[in-house]
Amino acid sequence: MTTIRIASYNTRDFLEDPYAAARVVRAIDPDVLCLQEVPRRLFSTQRVANFARDCGMYWSGRHRGSGGTTIFTSLRVDVVESRHQRLRVAFLQRTRGFALARVAAPGREPIAVASVHLSLDARERAEHAQVILRAVNAGGEVVLAGDLNEGESGQAWQAFAGVMRPVSPLTPTFPATRPRRVLDVIFASPGLQAEPHVALDIPEADLVAGSDHRPTWVDIRLGEPTLAQERAEEASARASESVTEEMVQEAEAEASDGAASAPTPAVSASPPDAGPPAP
């Protein structure tokens, strides 16, 4: 696996058509899906789990303190770590937070992926951007994706762009019916290379029905495996090649013989106790 597809999608708390949104996700077929505005309150865990199932993806099952952000993954990647962090907001404002996961493709070093949904207030967006950058700056490569609620001239966008670069296409994503603003974007650290964007055949009706935002996605080229990883893969391949058809047949025969020689439970020939005789 040399590339990993990362997508970002604001699903508006499933207030639109979640089945259409799930069809959109299936059409993108991401390895990592960064979500914003998933339900956070009544029955939210079950609703998000159902959405992951409909998308054909997997979820950690927790998103408390996430501010409505979370991350789904496919079986093509391993989740090394998954957590959510709350962000401080002004009194009576919508809760905010971000999701952070470290994911690894087979034979590759893990990368950090963050799903963010910034405030409607410009000052809060700038403050939250700094908190998020400190959290993801733990060494290694980083992908940050989400709904920034601002364009390229915004302070939060500029803060992210100061240490990363946008790698998703800068085409409008909001509103879904007639997109005019680029609010949803994916950034990557300098060590990650984005592949040319792949346009996908997603039904327009599903894009409009699924959410008030359109998704964005990018294919990231992964670094070459380390020498230790290459040696581990070679050892695994040699081990697999050393298993012959004859060995498989012998193992199956032993299992069959073991089942045949297992003691058969005794069965009583006496009729069941019918209770005392009738008077």
Image (spheres, rainbow, N blue to C red):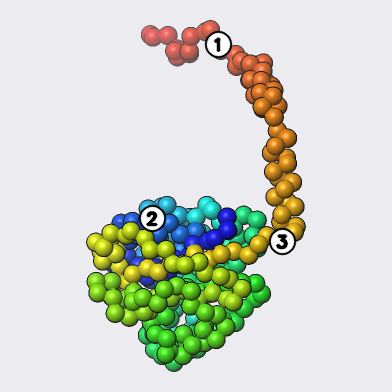
Q: Picture quarter containing residue 142? A: bottom right
Instruction: Report if the CB atoms under discs 1 and 2 are less than 8 Å apart.
Output: no
User: Which residue is the site of mark 2?
Assistant: 26
1 or 3: tag closer to the N-terminus: 3
Mark 1 vs mark 2: which is more N-terminal?
2
Q: Quick check: can you spot residue 16?
A: no
Instruction: Tell me the residue that label 1 is attached to.
Output: 268
**Residue 136 drawn at (x, y percent):** 59, 76
Residue 198 against residue 237 in the figure, above or below: below
Q: Position of residue 217 (x, y in %)?
A: 43, 67
Please give the name of the residue rendered at 66% of the width and 74% of the height, measured from the top-left corner. 139
Q: What element carries label 3?
A: loop
- Relative vertical location of residue 128 with respect to residue 71 in this rendering, above or below: below
Tell me if I can see residue 156 in this picture: yes
Q: Tell me the residue at 48%/13% (across/down).
A: 273
Q: In which quarter of the image is the C terminus?
A: top left
Kindly identify which residue carries mark 3: 226
